[in-house]
Image (cartoon, grey):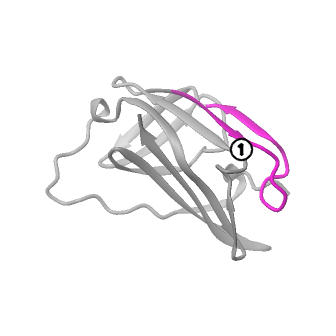
Amino acid sequence: MSVRIARWALLAAVGAGCSGATPLAPADLAGAYVATTISVVINGVTTNMLAKGASVSLLLTADGNATGRVVVPVLPGVQTVAVDDDLAGTYELIKDHVQLKPTVGTYLSGMIFTADLPELRAYVTIQDPSRSGQFTLILRHQ
């Protein structure tokens, strides 16, 4: 069974926005981001996916468009098929939460990031009959 994010029952653990803070605008997010953390803990076993060849690059524009790529190699016990997904599409910004809206489904579909500039952070709880844990993805503005 592939552990594709899109197939998991997702429960995004996103932090609440700071009250009183100036709301973010798409222009605040515009720029290039790369993954600094890609990790998963499944049944107590941590896998540093970034160290094993996974990568995410993302470019967000001020007009709401997104491009980029997510690559995940086969990782025994974590990922059964290699992933090389195009992130072309748009994104939605609601307060300090960002959701990518790729034109086609991707490994990151449905994931919600909290914008804590210069980082975008996503924490996804994995709840499956045979496993539980957490997926963490942190993208840093370049």
Could you say where residue 56 lies in the image, as x and y percent from the top left? Answer: 59, 39
Residue type indicated by callout 1:
Gly
Residue 18 occupies quadrant: bottom left
The residue that label 1 is drawn on is 53
Say if 15 sits above or below 34 in the image. below
State yes or no: residue 7 in magenta.
Answer: no
Q: Residue furthest bottom?
A: 44
Q: Which residues are magenta?
A: 67-86
Quadrant in which the N terminus appears: bottom right
Quadrant in which the C terminus appears: top left
Q: Residues within 10 Å of mark 1 (few under 14, many from 20)?
A: few
Which residue is rendered at x = 36% and y = 41% of the image?
93
Which residue is rendered at x = 78% and y = 44% of the image?
73
Could you say where residue 85 lies in the image, as x and y percent from the top left? Answer: 69, 33
- Of 94 and 45, the residue lying toward us: 45
90 relative to 28 in the view: left or right? right
Could you say where residue 72 lies in the image, as x and y percent from the top left? Answer: 72, 43
Which residue is rendered at x = 47% and y = 28% of the image?
59
Which residue is rendered at x = 37% and y = 63% of the image?
15
Could you say where residue 10 lies in the image, as x and y percent from the top left? Answer: 60, 61
Residue 102 occupies quadrant: top right
Dot 1: what SS? loop
